[in-house]
Every structure is written in C-alpha cells, then in structure tokens.
Image (cartoon, rainbow, N blue to C red):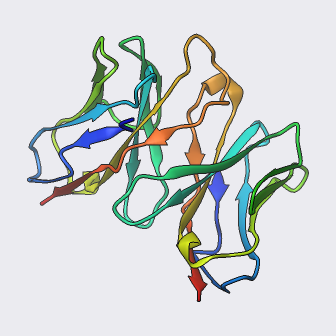
Amino acid sequence: DQQVKQNSPSLSVQEGRISILNCDYTNSMFDYFLWYKKYPAEGPTFLISISSIKDKNEDGRFTVFLNKSAKHLSLHIVPSQPGDSAVYFCAASYSYTGNQFYFGTGTSLTVIP
Amino acid sequence: DAGVTQSPTHLIKTRGQQVTLRCSPKSGHDTVSWYQQALGQGPQFIFQYYEEEERQRGNFPDRFSGHQFPNYSSELNVNALLLGDSALYLCASSSVGTGGAGANVLTFGAGSRLTVL
C-alpha cells in the first residue's frame, strides 16, 4: 500500500522557469515531510523539509508547500537550473515511529538549457 | 568529513545464497537505517538500528536481518535470496539519540546494488 505518491514520473522545464513537483499522501498521521534529490550512482541527498505545523518552508531557490486538508505537498524550484536535473523523492514520517520514512516513487526532473 | 560509506557497491548472487552488506555511518551519527529500492520504486524501509538493537522494522520477512556494532557501523544480511531481492540497498544514518521524533534528516550512502540470478 503506497502511502506516499508521486504521480508524475517525469517533468521537463526550461532553464530559468519554475519547476513544480507534486506529492500526495494518504496517512493523516504523517507530520513531517522531506524532499530528497538523487543523482545517478549516488545516494539521495536531503533538500528541504517541512513540519505539519507549517504550510510553507523556504530555502533559497527551493520552497515546499504543505496542504494538510488535501494531504498534498509540492516543491517549487525557482529559477530552475540544469544542475537541478535529478530524481526527486518526497518522504513522510510520523513522530511515534521515530524516523522511519515512507517514500514516493520519485519524479525525474530535466531542466533544459 | 566522510559521509555514509557502503560496501560492496555491486554484487551478484544466485537464488538461495546469502549476502551481507556493510555500512559505516556519517561521523557523529549513532543510528543506522536500511532501505531497499527496487527498480522504478522509492526506497522502502527495512529496519533501523540504535544502540546495537533493532528499534523499528518495516514489512520485510525474517530472511532480512541486521546488526549494529559498538562503533555504530551496521550490516544487513539477507538469507535464502530470491529473484525479487534484486535491488539497490541504501544505508542511511542519523543522530536520533534518545529522542523519538521524526525530525531527523537521513544521510544516505550511495548504496549496494544486488543482483540475484
């Protein structure tokens, strides 16, 4: 049972434009969400996180939005750069399980120069 | 500062064999989690070790077992390998300490690619 879903396997964006990656979850008990970026032959690297007490978190070009009522989060990258081309995973956890994370299937982002 | 290191990077086994994968956590981290990433899927939680004990376990059979050593490094063992065990096995470390909140960021290694023939 996939509790975290990324319904877009791939996304292509022109350099300088905004990239929007989406993620949906089914478990309302999730209270902490992260985005990871993965390059080929490397492990996922942490990008940005958000707690359920917030609806937005910003870090430089990256902003994550959380809509708890819709059980939806999104990652905005502005402006997009060719180096952002990677697979992006969203992940969720709920506090009582410590840091066991549930991952989506990933979205492959290609930023076209 | 070395991050999470895993070995071996690639290995090939046949059905029924056993495999051991190794992980050294990032310096300063005391907790190790193992994830399985099948082709085209996201990482799936196998288990987590803290203070040399299995603290949490995902939905994986007993053929998957692990160990954490006093220096925080860890091993993942898989017995009686099946074709479906072919995957990238990711080790992730974090610094949970005595806390239990899911507010810690995982640092991942590059993974061990297991192919079962």
Q: Position of residue B34 (x, y in %)?
A: 39, 37
Q: Position of residue A39 (x, y in %)?
A: 44, 64
* Residue nearest the viewer, comparing A108 with A84: A84
The answer to which image quadrant residue B98 occupies is top right
Count every numbered label the image shows and give the total. Answer: 0
Q: Is residue B3 above or below residue A106?
A: above
Which residue sits furthest front? Answer: B1
* Residue nearest the viewer, comparing A106 with A65: A65
**Quadrant location of the C terminus of chain A in the rendered image:** bottom right
Residue at 64% x, 65% y is A6
Q: Is residue A109 left or right of residue B84?
A: right
Q: Is residue B51 left or right of residue B73?
A: right
Q: Position of residue B85 (x, y in %)?
A: 27, 51
Q: Is residue A20 above or below residue B22?
A: below
Q: Is residue A43 left or right of residue A79?
A: left
Q: Position of residue B37 (x, y in %)?
A: 40, 54
Residue at 68% x, 49% y is A48
